[in-house]
Amino acid sequence: MLSGPEVEALAALSEAVGDLTHEWHSALAVERRARSMGDAAERRLDGAPFGFHTEALSGLYHHAFRYGREIETLLWRYASASAALGITVLDRVVTGKPPLDEESIDRLCEEPTLAELESLLRIPVDRLLGAREAGVRAREEERRRRLLDGVEAAYEILTDDMVEDRLDRPTAAAAQLSVAAIEGCDAPWVALLDGVLTVAGQAPYEIAFATRP
């Protein structure tokens, strides 16, 4: 069974991730629209003496892109925390461990470091989903493989020799990606966010399955 604080934390993070996901999708739609309008204005300009329209739309796209990146960063923080808490609670349920104390829950409600996330993603799927059908376990194994590839991609982005502000691997491992993201580079979670959102969304259902009577 789950403790009250575990239930409340899982629910609060799930709601935060849901709302932020909607806002992220809205921000991406604004960014795409601004880019499309800017492209159309560029085509219409064709030597016209005043370029204020294209300048305005270029500015709109710039701000839309920045806003979308900020929402995405916020979403990553909460989605990764939700996935970390969900995996940890599921693991403690299936292994028969006692409920998490409130200090542990509070820590898990913060964004994990890259090393912490990798460690959780390496928990064997058969241990977490041992009671599930073989097909479900196989799909989750494949998702975990892709996520671990995404972890390695995050390391590559943060430690790239071509980047002046690059980190060494131990520093990257100990970092939260929302803090370690390098200006002008791909977001280090670029290959992780979609999969982590899926894990975060599925965790409550897997926990419910594991705790059914």
Image (tube, grey):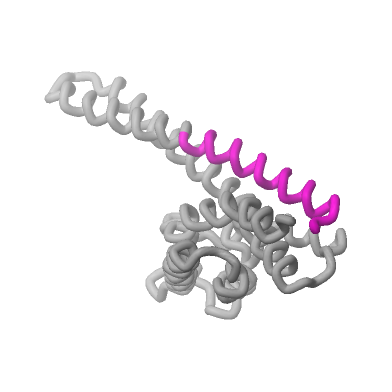
Answer whether residue 20 is magenta in the image: yes
Residue 9: give x, y in percent of width and height. 76, 50
Can residue 190 be seen here? yes
Please tell me which residue lies in front, 48 or 195: 195
Residue 40: give x, y in percent of width and height. 22, 26
Question: 63 left or right of 78?
Answer: left
Residue 29: give x, y in percent of width and height. 40, 32
Q: Which residues are magenta?
A: 1-25
Residue beneath the point at 23% across and 30% down: 39
Question: 98 left or right of 60?
Answer: right
Residue reaching furthest left? 46
Residue beneath the point at 28% across and 30% down: 36
Residue beneath the point at 69% across and 68% down: 91
Question: 112 left or right of 28?
Answer: right
Per the picture, the main secondary structure of the magenta-coloured stretch is helix
Can residue 150 be seen here? no
The answer to whether 49 is drawn above or below residue 162 in the figure is above
Answer whether residue 6 is magenta in the image: yes
Residue reaching furthest front? 213
Q: How many marks?
A: 0
Residue beneath the point at 23% across and 24% down: 41
Q: Toward which corner of the image does residue 30 lie, by quadrant? A: top left
Q: Toward which corner of the image does residue 212 lie, by quadrant? A: bottom right
Please tell me which residue lies in front, 135 or 46: 135
Q: Quadrant of the C terminus?
A: bottom right
Residue 170: give x, y in percent of width and height. 59, 80
Q: Quadrant of the N terminus?
A: bottom right
